[in-house]
Every structure is written in structure tokens, then in C-alpha cells.
Amino acid sequence: MQKAMFERNDIRSKGNSQHELPDQKNILSPEVKHSILKARAQALAVEKNDAAGQKEFMEVIVFGLATETYGIESKFIREVYPLKDYTALPGIPSFVLGIVNVRGQIVSVIDFKKFFNLPEKGLGELNKVIIIRNEKMEFGILADNINDARSIAIEELQTPPVSTNGIGAAYLRGITGDQIIILDAQRILEDRDIIINQEST
């Protein structure tokens, strides 16, 4: 499989710096922002009712991908962007859908359905790009649809079974009681099989 690496400077337009990125609260859709605020309120209510007060929670954006429901921590999400248009590039792995222009910034988009050989549904009006990032890397993940945002108690996550269909257990943090598969965003952002190296031949 061809390997790739878009350094953060390669996928951002010239002149942009990390400080120039728009604040997350201003770029999420009103529906997603409302869901995040609701999740935070629910987490606060649970924490108040928790006698021990020791539970640790994480906020996740929940989305559909193929036949499963996934979640990814909101702290790794720069924004959720509607897939209006994209540009396919020659000579790149098939799991790279292409690039999108997000207010002048060029962002590569990964199609996990192709990377992990998941069932494909085709593109539609509900498709979204979840742009994830850490201090070194940034790219978009194609989602079939966005469900909501919620707060999840970390200690309640179940260990993913080795036989998990689709996305491998190495890319997962765990599974909730209602079968939401929580992705390990840090692991995904550091995976050299996903990252694209423009100097590859």
C-alpha cells in the first residue's frame, strides 16, 4: 500500500498559522454546537449525582459510517464541514477521496470505508467531512452522516473484541454499552499507513 504524509504545512494554505484557525465554536454547525452543549450539561448533571465524583468523561461527536455508528473525541475535531465538492488527485492511494478547500485552506480527505474495506454507500447530501488534528497532523475523515454529540464516561467503555468487523481494534478506544464504537483519534493521526507522503514514488 502506498504510504503518504501531508505535513500540516502541506495541507494548509500559505500564510495560515495555527493561531489563524477559526475557533471551533464558530465553525461547527448550530445543530452540532447544540448537541455539544447538551452533552456537557448532561455530563455535569451526572457528575453532580455521582456520589464518588470520580468519573472521567469525554465529549464525542457521533457519526455514521457504513453499517456502524462511531464516535470521535471532540478535542481532536477542528470542525465538521459539509462535503459540497472535492478534487480527486492522480497518483494517490484509493482511500484518499481527494482534497477540499475549506475557506482557502486545502485539506485532504480520507475515506475509511475504502481504507478498512467497509461496505460503500456512495456519496450523498448528508456526507460530512470531520476535520481532525493534533499538534503535527491534520486531515478530514469522510462520514456518511453526523448523528449528535454526547458525553461518555471513560470507565464505562468496553474493550473492543479482537474480531471487531471493519475498523481494526488497534484504531479503537472502546465500545459503549449502546454499541457506539469510539475511535482512537491520536492513533489515527499518527498512523503512517494513512498519512500521505507527497515525495513517495
Image (spheres, grey):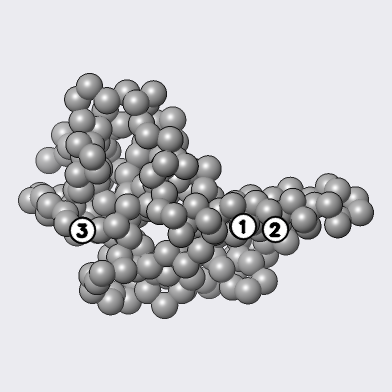
Q: Which mark, by number, is residue 185?
A: none
Quadrant of the image occupied by residue 30? bottom left
Look at mark 2 in the image and give the residue it sits on. Answer: 42
Q: Secondary structure at mark 2?
A: helix
At 42% from the left edge and 64% from the top edge, which residue is drawn? 146
Q: Secondary structure at mark 3?
A: loop
| Looking at the image, residue 128 lies above or below residue 101 | below
Mark 1–mark 2 distance (CA, rounded to whole Å)? 6 Å
Q: Which mark, by number, is residue 38?
A: 1
Disc 1 vs disc 3: which is toward the camera? 1
Callout 2 crowding tier (Cα within 10 Å): few <14, some 14–19, many ≥20? some
Callout 3 crowding tier (Cα within 10 Å): few <14, some 14–19, many ≥20? few
Mark 3–mark 2 distance (CA, rounded to whole Å)? 33 Å
Q: Position of residue 127 (x, y in %)?
A: 30, 65
| Sequence-earlier tag: 3 or 2 | 2
At 86% from the left edge and 55% from the top edge, which residue is drawn? 50
Q: Nearer the viewer, residue 145 or 190?
A: 145
Residue type of the residue flagged with mark 2: Gln
Q: Position of residue 100 (x, y in %)?
A: 20, 48
Q: Is residue 132 visible?
A: no
At 19% from the left edge and 25% from the top edge, which residue is drawn? 14
At 25% from the left edge and 58% from the top edge, which residue is drawn? 83
Q: Position of residue 174 (x, y in %)?
A: 60, 60
Q: Secondary structure at mark 1?
A: helix
Q: Which mark, by number, is residue 84?
A: 3
Residues marked 1 and 2 touching at CB (< 8 Å): yes
